[in-house]
Image (spheres, helix red, strand yellow):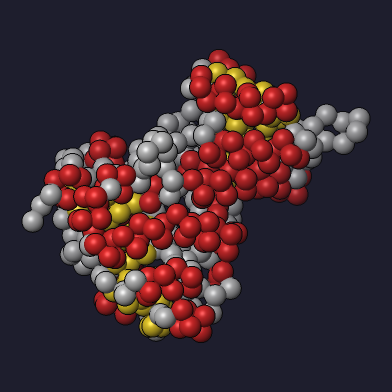
Amino acid sequence: MIVGTTKEIKNHEYRVGLTPESVFELVGQGNEVIVEAGAGLGIGATDETYVEAGAEILSSAADVFAKAEMIVKVKEPQAVERAMLREGQILYTYLHLAPDPEQTKDLVKSGAICIAYETVTDDAGTLPLLKPMSQVAGRMSIQAGATALEKAHGGRGVLLGGVPGVAPGKVAVIGGGVVGLNAAQMAVGLGADVTILDRNPDALERLGNYFEARAKTRFSNRANLAECVAEADLVVGAVLVPGAAAPKLVSREMLATMKPGAVLADVAIDQGGCFETSKATTHDDPTYMVDGIVHYCVANMPGAVARTSTYALNNVTLPHALRIAKKGWKDALRDDPHLENGLNVWNGKITCKPVADDLGYDYTPASEAVGSL
């Protein structure tokens, strides 16, 4: 198979779909790999490094899209990239379609086979291709939140860890999954006063056992959520409904109960955000104010630590890419129901039920696509 990767063009996105090491594996399996010139510079990988791994360097993204049978990316394709997709071409990347009707419409129109990292599952019922970026984003949410709390950035002027004789900052983490766990680890490590909210009793027990007395857990009902948000210096939104738009858990009315200069960091912004006042921002201009509350809502947080993120991502995405390239997409998905769950768009149809439900499309089961001639 001809596999291609291009330079990411989303604002301040420095990750790349394939590392040179991944290219080496694909070429070793008998595939042809084409890479846009400069695609890996954000992680310190030069064109020469890709050539040494066996890739061919093409001068433009248009050239890669025109030749490749499968495009491997990191972020959802931007409008100019979507216009280059063709019928039957495989797109393998993060998509986050539920809050993005324009992207969805373009992918449906393209006729491409679109496999989304974020809906691929595993035997444990988790999302293994989303996990490493959730780990990165969870950890970064505390770094970003701590910076946003500084007075020069519009915050309250609170040091999360405090100092002897001064109380530490209070952090509320909404959601006890991968993002929430990693956010809480970082906040606890800084010495903050941390509370994690979740609706799953098993998750609360697991988190309680993990952190012992270093972090508190609360059941996430409306009363507890309102209380924790009002008391917090930093609130981290770490909620995920696989494939679907994130629920709006913190209302605008709640902002009035918060301390002026407190910070909301919405890690769920890729799926539309879990705060009513959230809107996607970029690394160029990461924060904005609503009713005196700082909002940090960067939609590609892991792009800021591109090298760490790219290698962590390739560790989990490459095995599936190798199988797709070896078997073809239908056989690869037919042989692996977890990879089949990653199919979001096929032949102009939506094959991910949460996306279809949220955006009002007819739903076509992925099994129909895999079983088609």
Residue 35 coordinates in the image, percent (x, y):
40, 77
Residue 146 coordinates in the image, percent (x, y):
71, 44
Image quarter where the C terminus lies is: bottom left
How many marks the image carries: the answer is 0
Q: Nearer the viewer, residue 17 or 260?
A: 17
Q: Residue at x 62, y 48 (%)?
A: 140
Identify the image quadrant of residue 253.
top right
Q: Residue at x 51, y 22 (%)?
A: 202
Q: Residue at x 51, y 19 (%)?
A: 201
Q: Please determine whether, in this image, residue 318 is positioned above or below residue 271.
A: below
Q: Nearer the viewer, residue 45 or 137?
A: 45
Image quarter where the N terminus lies is: bottom left
79 vs 308, left or right, is left
As drawn, the residue found furthest toward the top would be 223
- Could you tell me if residue 266 is visible in this image? no
As drawn, the residue found furthest toward the right would be 165
81 vs 331, left or right, is right
Residue 84 coordinates in the image, percent (x, y):
27, 70
Identify the image quadrant of residue 68.
bottom left
Q: Residue at x 45, y 54 (%)?
A: 316
- Could you tell me if residue 131 is visible in this image? yes
253 vs 211, left or right, is left
Residue 180 coordinates in the image, percent (x, y):
57, 35
Q: Please determine whether, in this image, residue 45 is positioned above or below residue 85.
A: below
Q: Nearer the viewer, residue 20 or 9?
A: 20
